[in-house]
Image (tube, rainbow, N blue to C red):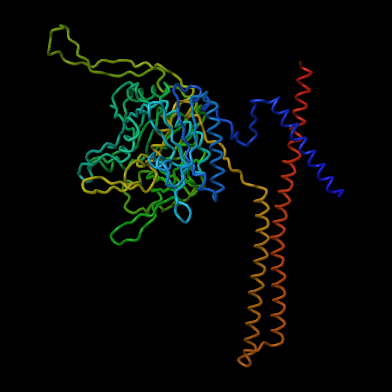
Amino acid sequence: MKNMMHSKTGLIVILAIFIVFSLLSARLFNGVRLDLTEGQLYTLTGETQKILSELDSPVTFKLYFSEKATVELPGLRTYAHRIKELLEEYKTLSGGKLKVTFVDPIPFSEEEDEASSAGLQGVPVGLRGDEIFFGLVGTNDSGAEEIISFFQPDKEQFVEYELTKLIYNLSNPRLPVVGIISGVNINGGFDYMTRQRQPAWVVMQQMEDLFDVRPLADDVDEIDPEVDILLLVHPKNLSQQMLFAIDQFVMKGGRTLVFVDPFAEADQPPAPMAASASRRSDLTPLFAEWGIALQDAHIVGDFANSLVVNMGDGRNPVRHIALLGLDTAAFNDEDVVMAGLESINLSSVGILDLLEGATTTVVPLIQSSAESQPLVAGRLNELQNPEALMESFAPTGQQYTLAARITGSAKSAFPEGVEVEEQEVVAEEPDVADAEPVMVKRLLVPEVLENSNINVIVVADTDILSDRLWVQVQQFFGQRVVSPWADNAGFLVNSLEHLAGNEDLINIRSRGRFSRPFTKVEALRRNAEEQFLAQQQVLQEQLQETEAKLLEMEQMRGDADSAILSEEQALELARFQDEKVKIRKELRDVQHQLDRDIESLGTELKMINIFLVPLLLTLFLVLMRVVRKRVT
């Protein structure tokens, strides 16, 4: 009875504390939000808030989540709840310009048909194979539509970027303009090796579906102001005039994606010149100001990421350490450009070095493994068997940068301008029709000498874009059918889409993860498993020793009475059985101790959440109230 009274008194005290805390917090902190989560999960970045505040026209978000069909998927339901909370935060900060609705597309409903027709991804679950949806459709007032086909829990750190990009695209529906300058036949052309016309690379089709792609002349002194992103593929033998144009584009804030190469295999010179012609890209003057350098005559040999190639003619496949197949271990998973990519193939890839004293920030996007070594690029000219590259191969233990993002302050490579020669017709008499052209000199003067935050992505390989490294192309009734087997095009599109955003969108980086592992519980579990495995190993060793002992005694007995155990064998077997039971009990004790430790930890956390946190918050509120009274 006395315990019951104490229990009731405790509940009354807890209820009183809760009521006091609720009343005080409602009065003192009305409208105030405090985000104490690691990584500020419930606080949108300043860049997102700015984009939301600048919305000119209404945008509507419709989140489709299969609420009823995911009852047995608690992890996905928790993630969906986080997304809903995030969308509500977007709605609040938009000042009424963003409208958010939530839809449960139950099977065979009109809502399910809407989700499917919008292009959302349905995932079959359960015995009946009903599809669940967890995607978003965004529309603007002119009817333009953008979607997120499915919110993948393993990509949650990029959710804010994806949502904000979707809003930006809906409020800026114009296709970004990509201007291309290429030193290889990315648009197709004559192949001197096969002596046939070649179609455009598949990546061109990928880009043309998403961007306004415009080939640019390589003899201009200014990039077209309409170009949003400049794409350089194997820039080679560019004139000072062209380098000046690229320099000023970057200095004026133009976003640039560069693919360079110490040995561009797609650069196929005519046969007589093939052995001696240089296949190296060259942007040295610009790279020097951007804080990087492409190693002059080296490629990366990477044993851990090397691919095995078929030599044909019945010969065994061999490992090619200059032909690389990279997976997520080589990617910077903190950068949104690499989001969703699983594999990228590179060939004769170069090395990007950070220059000493650079004023820019260089962040690696793709790196080699530690089982790498620089190789002389010239060895590829006469390479007949890739196994030859393994001769004297000695990994340095260093990871080399193969692709990087460059931001920060950079100066113009041409502060004094560039003097160019041009043909002009100079006639003494205006009516003279056959006046001879003469060469005249003209000074190109830079308009901008420094940019405090350039946005450039550099990749030390151009073959990454060629069809042979990522896609299979077949002809089907006169149509090209493409089957990608690597994410090379995805990397290109990700980079372009990211650079196409405004400055605020580009500056949004990955946020923390909503899910938080119970690290203390995991540590307890790991310790228990180590003990469990150690005990299990002892049992196995004792079992083997006993079986060996029994076999030895059996051999000593000979064939007589083989079915009957001797007294010594019976005692040994009984001892083993007792020991086996004892060790199994110890194993159960280890597991039970683990459960007790976890339960004890859970009890402590409950006590903290129920008693300590409300008490501390109440005391804090009372203190704030006292301070306010004294101030007033």
- Residue 545 placement, left or right of 281: right
Q: x%, y% of residue 493?
A: 39, 37
Residue occupying image coordinates x 28% and y 24%: 219
Q: Which quadrant of the structure image shows residue 85?
A: top right
Look at the image and tell me in which quarter the C terminus lies: top right
Residue lying furthest bottom: 560
Residue occupying image coordinates x 39% and y 21%: 248
Determine whether 510 is above or below 478 in the image. above
- Residue 396 placement, left or right of 442: right
Determine whether 272 is above or below 52 in the image. below
Q: x%, y% of residue 30?
A: 66, 25
Residue lying furthest right: 2
Q: Nearer the viewer, residue 20 or 256?
A: 20
Q: x%, y% of residue 265?
A: 32, 43
Q: x%, y% of residue 211?
A: 34, 32
Determine whether 467 is above or below 419 in the image. below
Residue occupying image coordinates x 72% and y 41%: 609
Q: Which quadrant of the structure image shows residue 420?
A: top left
Determine whether 71 is above or below 440 in the image. below
Residue lying furthest top: 429
Q: Nearer the viewer, residue 62 or 294?
A: 62
In this figure, what is the number of numbered marks? 0
